[in-house]
């Protein structure tokens, strides 16, 4: 537990302070000492918050997930969930995936390939996001959750893949890529259209195909 | 230059030998000593082949590009270039992007975010691949190269993004992802359909939109 006599920095503040160090030095290159220094803490105190780099990744992922969950809650409580979902994804691509996060996610992705603990954290994150998509798809199409999962699991996974592909690109590339962005957004829309078509055209048992196919 | 009295390993062989070390330890975690050991060479001799980690990345990228160029040459000389291109992309997704390459590309992507030299190497690689796509698109649609570039640069970039998104996913995820793969392949096909439609329907000046729009 954090020392109760010292001013207690919030975990979020620490994350903000160490982000840049990870981006600059990489996860392997940044020592716990570097990170503690960036957070303005002693190494011992830093370890109380984050006993390992995996714990830091977990905290970064958890924080990102909280934002995603807020977004999805707004979708679920909306009068037109599908339109709201399109808006939110568009906003994520156009605005929210800011340049400073890309190096961090690229690092985490690389780590996930060689560290099973990090892979597990990432996999759980993506599973939660896919589940949130599927909850919306079930609601929008009026399908029971199991049916929605059988039909749209790939659509949810593909949306996650598209957003992540954009997030991982280096900023120089994204900066001028207006038309690439528009193709990406059209592809996201087409994926959601297939789900929405299911609502409009009624049931089709074709798994992994457009619902109306 | 390599020592002419010693048996001379080919650069390709060295790359094969050190791939696993990068995948296991990461680019920062693997020292030049680790890499020399994996290649069965003295550190001094190893440095003659690869004076820096950037030189290794450059060699890995160059080798990968040679494979891509062979593929594109087969497309250009084919009777039905668009069909051959679809086949080759399908093969890349289904077979060629084998599990052992994913960690390496994830590492290179992460490095590109914090090392401008690596970013430059990656950017040149992607530029060459996009240019090869555009060459095929110009041929298929009968457009002058500059016109093809204006119309289809985003399509080429999007195809690169889709293939890379798949390549970067961790293997556990791709293994069971039959339906995700099929959505990805449909998205690749839809992107190529937009280009092909240009051939069928004739010119439209709408940049970044389907040619027939």
Image: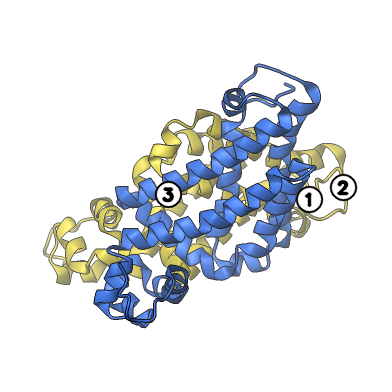
Chain colours: A yellow, B blue
Dot in front, 3 or 1: 3
Horizontal arrangement in the rendering, residue A200 relative to residue B186 (left or right)? right
Residues at marks 2 and 1 on the same chain = yes
Residue A121 seen: no
The location of residue A135, given as percent across then percent down, is: 66, 51
Q: Residues within 10 Å of mark 3 (few under 14, many from 20)?
A: many
Please tell me which residue is depicted at 39% across the width and 76% down the height of the picture: B8
Horizontal arrangement in the rendering, residue A186 relative to residue A152 (left or right)? left
Q: Residues within 10 Å of mark 1 (few under 14, many from 20)?
A: some
Residues at marks 3 and 1 on the same chain = no
Dot in front, 2 or 1: 2
Q: Which chain is mark 2 on?
A: A
Task: Please say if the residues under marks 2 and 1 sit with CB atoms less than 8 Å apart.
Answer: yes
Give the residue number, with chain letter if any, for mark 1: A143
Q: Residues within 10 Å of mark 2 (few under 14, many from 20)?
A: some
Could you tell me how far apart the alpha carbons at marks 2 and 1 are, in whole angstroms?
Answer: 9 Å
Horizontal arrangement in the rendering, residue A69 relative to residue B206 (left or right)? left
Give the residue number, with chain letter if any, for mark 3: B122
The location of residue A129, given as percent across then percent down, is: 56, 54
- Rendered-image quadrant of the N terminus of chain B: bottom left
* Front one among B24 and B119: B119
* Front one among B198 and B131: B131
Q: Which chain is mark 1 on?
A: A
Residue A203 disc label: 2
In the image, is residue B77 above or below residue A37?
above
Q: Which chain is mark 3 on?
A: B
């Amino acid at each position: 537990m954090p020392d109760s006599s010292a001013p207690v920095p919030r975990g979020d503040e620490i994350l903000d302070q160490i982000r840049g160090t990870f981006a600059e030095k990489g996860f392997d290159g940044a020592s716990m000492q570097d990170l503690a220094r960036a957070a303005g803490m002693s190494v011992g105190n830093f370890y109380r918050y984050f006993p390992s780099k995996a714990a830091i990744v977990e905290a970064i992922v958890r924080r990102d997930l909280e934002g995603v969950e807020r977004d999805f809650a707004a979708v679920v409580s909306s009068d037109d969930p599908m339109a709201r979902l399109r808006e939110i994804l568009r906003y994520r691509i156009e605005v929210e995936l800011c340049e400073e996060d890309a190096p961090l996610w690229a690092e985490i992705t690389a780590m996930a390939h060689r560290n099973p603990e990090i892979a597990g954290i990432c996999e759980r994150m993506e599973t939660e996001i896919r589940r949130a998509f599927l909850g919306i798809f079930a609601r929008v199409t009026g399908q029971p959750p199991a049916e929605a999962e059988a039909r749209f699991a790939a659509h949810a996974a593909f949306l996650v893949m598209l957003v992540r592909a954009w997030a991982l690109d280096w900023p120089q590339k994204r900066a001028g890529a207006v038309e690439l962005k528009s193709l990406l957004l059209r592809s996201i829309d087409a994926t959601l259209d297939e789900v929405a078509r299911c609502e409009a055209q009624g049931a089709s048992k074709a798994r992994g195909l457009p619902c109306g196919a």
